[in-house]
Image (spheres, rainbow, N blue to C red):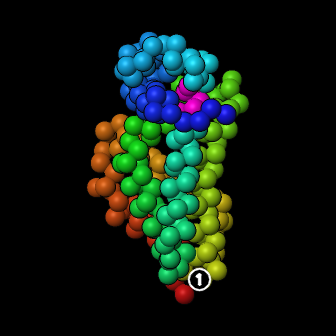
Amino acid sequence: MQRSSPKKDAILREATKLFSENGYWDTSISDIAHATGVAEGTIFYHFHSKEELFLAVLQKFKTELISSFHQFLDTHEFADGLEMLEASITFYLQQTRKMEERFLLLHRHHYYQIAEDNQKCWHHLEDIYSSLISIFEQAIIKGQKDCSIKPVSTKNKALLIFTLVDGLVRLNTYKLYRADELYNDLIESCRSMLQSTT
Protein backbone atom coordinates (compact mmCIF):
# COMPACT_ATOMS: atom_id res chain seq x y z
CA MET A 1 0.00 0.00 0.00
CA GLN A 2 1.34 3.41 -0.99
CA ARG A 3 1.78 5.88 1.83
CA SER A 4 -0.14 9.13 1.72
CA SER A 5 1.66 12.13 0.23
CA PRO A 6 0.75 15.81 -0.19
CA LYS A 7 0.15 15.29 -3.93
CA LYS A 8 -2.01 12.23 -3.35
CA ASP A 9 -4.02 14.08 -0.70
CA ALA A 10 -4.47 17.02 -3.07
CA ILE A 11 -5.66 14.70 -5.84
CA LEU A 12 -8.20 13.11 -3.49
CA ARG A 13 -9.38 16.52 -2.30
CA GLU A 14 -9.90 17.93 -5.81
CA ALA A 15 -11.42 14.68 -7.08
CA THR A 16 -13.93 14.76 -4.21
CA LYS A 17 -14.91 18.30 -5.11
CA LEU A 18 -15.29 17.61 -8.82
CA PHE A 19 -17.08 14.27 -8.42
CA SER A 20 -19.47 16.00 -6.01
CA GLU A 21 -20.13 19.03 -8.20
CA ASN A 22 -20.13 17.45 -11.66
CA GLY A 23 -20.73 13.75 -11.09
CA TYR A 24 -18.51 10.83 -12.03
CA TRP A 25 -19.27 10.72 -15.76
CA ASP A 26 -18.77 14.45 -16.30
CA THR A 27 -15.47 14.60 -14.43
CA SER A 28 -12.35 13.65 -16.37
CA ILE A 29 -8.86 12.85 -15.19
CA SER A 30 -7.82 15.93 -17.15
CA ASP A 31 -10.22 18.06 -15.06
CA ILE A 32 -8.76 16.65 -11.84
CA ALA A 33 -5.18 17.15 -13.04
CA HIS A 34 -5.93 20.77 -13.98
CA ALA A 35 -7.61 21.49 -10.62
CA THR A 36 -4.78 19.83 -8.70
CA GLY A 37 -1.97 21.36 -10.76
CA VAL A 38 -0.33 18.02 -11.54
CA ALA A 39 0.21 16.00 -14.70
CA GLU A 40 -2.29 13.27 -15.57
CA GLY A 41 0.54 10.79 -15.25
CA THR A 42 0.93 11.77 -11.59
CA ILE A 43 -2.70 10.85 -10.98
CA PHE A 44 -2.23 7.49 -12.71
CA TYR A 45 0.89 6.90 -10.61
CA HIS A 46 -1.27 6.99 -7.47
CA PHE A 47 -4.51 5.60 -8.95
CA HIS A 48 -4.61 3.24 -11.93
CA SER A 49 -7.96 4.47 -13.24
CA LYS A 50 -10.67 7.05 -12.68
CA GLU A 51 -12.80 4.34 -11.07
CA GLU A 52 -10.00 3.47 -8.62
CA LEU A 53 -9.68 7.16 -7.76
CA PHE A 54 -13.42 7.41 -7.15
CA LEU A 55 -13.31 4.35 -4.88
CA ALA A 56 -10.44 5.93 -2.94
CA VAL A 57 -12.52 9.10 -2.48
CA LEU A 58 -15.46 7.04 -1.23
CA GLN A 59 -13.28 4.96 1.09
CA LYS A 60 -11.67 8.08 2.58
CA PHE A 61 -15.09 9.57 3.24
CA LYS A 62 -16.29 6.32 4.84
CA THR A 63 -13.23 6.08 7.08
CA GLU A 64 -13.42 9.69 8.23
CA LEU A 65 -17.18 9.67 8.84
CA ILE A 66 -17.23 6.42 10.81
CA SER A 67 -14.09 7.38 12.73
CA SER A 68 -15.58 10.75 13.69
CA PHE A 69 -18.69 9.02 15.05
CA HIS A 70 -16.66 6.51 17.07
CA GLN A 71 -14.54 9.31 18.52
CA PHE A 72 -17.65 11.29 19.41
CA LEU A 73 -19.30 8.32 21.15
CA ASP A 74 -16.09 7.31 22.94
CA THR A 75 -15.52 10.79 24.37
CA HIS A 76 -19.05 11.59 25.52
CA GLU A 77 -21.20 10.23 28.30
CA PHE A 78 -24.97 10.12 28.02
CA ALA A 79 -27.51 10.10 30.81
CA ASP A 80 -29.57 7.52 28.95
CA GLY A 81 -30.22 6.00 25.54
CA LEU A 82 -32.64 8.71 24.46
CA GLU A 83 -30.00 11.37 25.11
CA MET A 84 -27.46 9.28 23.19
CA LEU A 85 -29.84 9.05 20.24
CA GLU A 86 -30.56 12.78 20.19
CA ALA A 87 -26.85 13.59 20.52
CA SER A 88 -26.05 11.19 17.66
CA ILE A 89 -28.64 12.85 15.42
CA THR A 90 -27.22 16.28 16.29
CA PHE A 91 -23.67 15.10 15.60
CA TYR A 92 -24.74 13.55 12.28
CA LEU A 93 -26.27 16.85 11.16
CA GLN A 94 -23.10 18.68 12.21
CA GLN A 95 -21.01 16.27 10.14
CA THR A 96 -23.19 16.83 7.08
CA ARG A 97 -22.40 20.53 7.29
CA LYS A 98 -18.71 19.89 7.88
CA MET A 99 -18.51 17.34 5.03
CA GLU A 100 -21.07 18.95 2.74
CA GLU A 101 -19.23 18.14 -0.51
CA ARG A 102 -18.87 14.50 0.41
CA PHE A 103 -22.52 14.15 1.36
CA LEU A 104 -23.44 15.57 -2.04
CA LEU A 105 -21.22 12.83 -3.45
CA LEU A 106 -23.07 10.26 -1.33
CA HIS A 107 -26.47 11.46 -2.51
CA ARG A 108 -25.82 11.35 -6.25
CA HIS A 109 -27.99 8.64 -7.76
CA HIS A 110 -25.60 7.45 -10.45
CA TYR A 111 -23.06 6.31 -7.86
CA TYR A 112 -25.57 3.65 -6.87
CA GLN A 113 -25.72 2.64 -10.53
CA ILE A 114 -21.92 2.23 -10.44
CA ALA A 115 -22.33 0.14 -7.28
CA GLU A 116 -24.57 -2.32 -9.13
CA ASP A 117 -21.55 -3.41 -11.19
CA ASN A 118 -18.76 -2.67 -8.72
CA GLN A 119 -18.68 -4.67 -5.49
CA LYS A 120 -16.13 -2.39 -3.81
CA CYS A 121 -18.32 0.64 -4.42
CA TRP A 122 -21.35 -1.26 -3.13
CA HIS A 123 -19.51 -2.31 0.04
CA HIS A 124 -18.32 1.24 0.77
CA LEU A 125 -21.87 2.59 0.47
CA GLU A 126 -23.30 -0.29 2.48
CA ASP A 127 -20.68 0.21 5.23
CA ILE A 128 -21.50 3.91 5.52
CA TYR A 129 -25.23 3.39 5.87
CA SER A 130 -24.98 0.28 8.05
CA SER A 131 -22.61 2.04 10.47
CA LEU A 132 -24.90 5.05 10.84
CA ILE A 133 -28.01 2.92 11.35
CA SER A 134 -26.10 0.78 13.86
CA ILE A 135 -25.30 3.85 15.98
CA PHE A 136 -29.00 4.73 16.22
CA GLU A 137 -29.78 1.10 17.00
CA GLN A 138 -27.20 1.02 19.82
CA ALA A 139 -28.80 4.11 21.35
CA ILE A 140 -32.26 2.52 21.20
CA ILE A 141 -30.97 -0.68 22.83
CA LYS A 142 -29.32 1.38 25.57
CA GLY A 143 -32.55 3.32 26.05
CA GLN A 144 -34.61 0.17 26.39
CA LYS A 145 -32.22 -1.09 29.06
CA ASP A 146 -32.39 2.14 31.07
CA CYS A 147 -36.14 2.57 30.36
CA SER A 148 -35.81 5.95 28.61
CA ILE A 149 -37.08 4.29 25.42
CA LYS A 150 -40.17 2.12 25.24
CA PRO A 151 -40.11 -1.44 23.86
CA VAL A 152 -39.89 -1.20 20.06
CA SER A 153 -38.24 -3.07 17.21
CA THR A 154 -34.74 -1.65 17.53
CA LYS A 155 -33.70 -2.40 13.96
CA ASN A 156 -36.88 -1.04 12.37
CA LYS A 157 -36.95 2.13 14.45
CA ALA A 158 -33.23 2.77 13.87
CA LEU A 159 -33.81 2.48 10.12
CA LEU A 160 -36.86 4.74 10.28
CA ILE A 161 -35.00 7.41 12.27
CA PHE A 162 -32.05 7.23 9.89
CA THR A 163 -34.47 7.66 6.97
CA LEU A 164 -35.95 10.78 8.61
CA VAL A 165 -32.52 12.28 9.30
CA ASP A 166 -31.05 11.34 5.91
CA GLY A 167 -34.11 12.70 4.10
CA LEU A 168 -33.65 16.01 5.87
CA VAL A 169 -29.94 15.99 5.00
CA ARG A 170 -30.76 15.40 1.32
CA LEU A 171 -33.12 18.39 1.28
CA ASN A 172 -30.33 20.46 2.80
CA THR A 173 -27.67 19.05 0.46
CA TYR A 174 -29.68 20.06 -2.61
CA LYS A 175 -30.48 23.47 -1.05
CA LEU A 176 -34.20 22.69 -1.08
CA TYR A 177 -34.69 23.33 2.64
CA ARG A 178 -32.56 24.26 5.62
CA ALA A 179 -32.18 21.20 7.85
CA ASP A 180 -31.67 23.27 11.01
CA GLU A 181 -35.13 24.81 10.62
CA LEU A 182 -36.68 21.38 11.12
CA TYR A 183 -34.25 20.20 13.79
CA ASN A 184 -36.60 20.72 16.76
CA ASP A 185 -39.44 18.99 14.91
CA LEU A 186 -37.16 16.08 14.08
CA ILE A 187 -36.11 15.62 17.71
CA GLU A 188 -39.72 15.97 18.89
CA SER A 189 -40.83 13.32 16.37
CA CYS A 190 -38.13 10.91 17.57
CA ARG A 191 -39.15 11.47 21.20
CA SER A 192 -42.79 10.92 20.35
CA MET A 193 -41.90 7.71 18.57
CA LEU A 194 -39.60 6.31 21.25
CA GLN A 195 -39.82 8.00 24.65
CA SER A 196 -40.99 5.78 27.46
CA THR A 197 -43.91 7.11 29.52
CA THR A 198 -43.05 5.02 32.58
Q: Tell me where residue 170 sits by quadrant.
A: top left
Image-based side of 151 in relation to 90, left or right:
right
Residue 188 lies, with reference to residue 126, above or below; the image says: below
Image-based side of 123 in relation to 161, left or right:
right
Identify the residue at horizontal 64%, vertical 45% (top origin). Answer: 127
Q: Name the residue under label 1.
A: 147
Q: Can residue 145 be seen in this view?
A: yes
Q: Tell me where residue 139 sits by quadrant.
A: bottom right
- Of 69 and 103, nearer the camera is 69
Q: In which quarter of the image is the N terminus?
A: top right
List x then y, in percent, for residue 103.
44, 40
List x then y, in percent, for residue 145.
64, 80
User: Which is the main secondary structure of the residues drawn in magenta?
Assistant: helix
Indicate the amino acid at tag 1: Cys
Identify the residue at horizontal 43%, vertical 30% (top origin). Answer: 10
Numbered range of the magenta stretch = 53-58
Residue 152 lies, with reference to residue 31, above or below; the image says: below
Toward the bottom, the furthest residue is 198
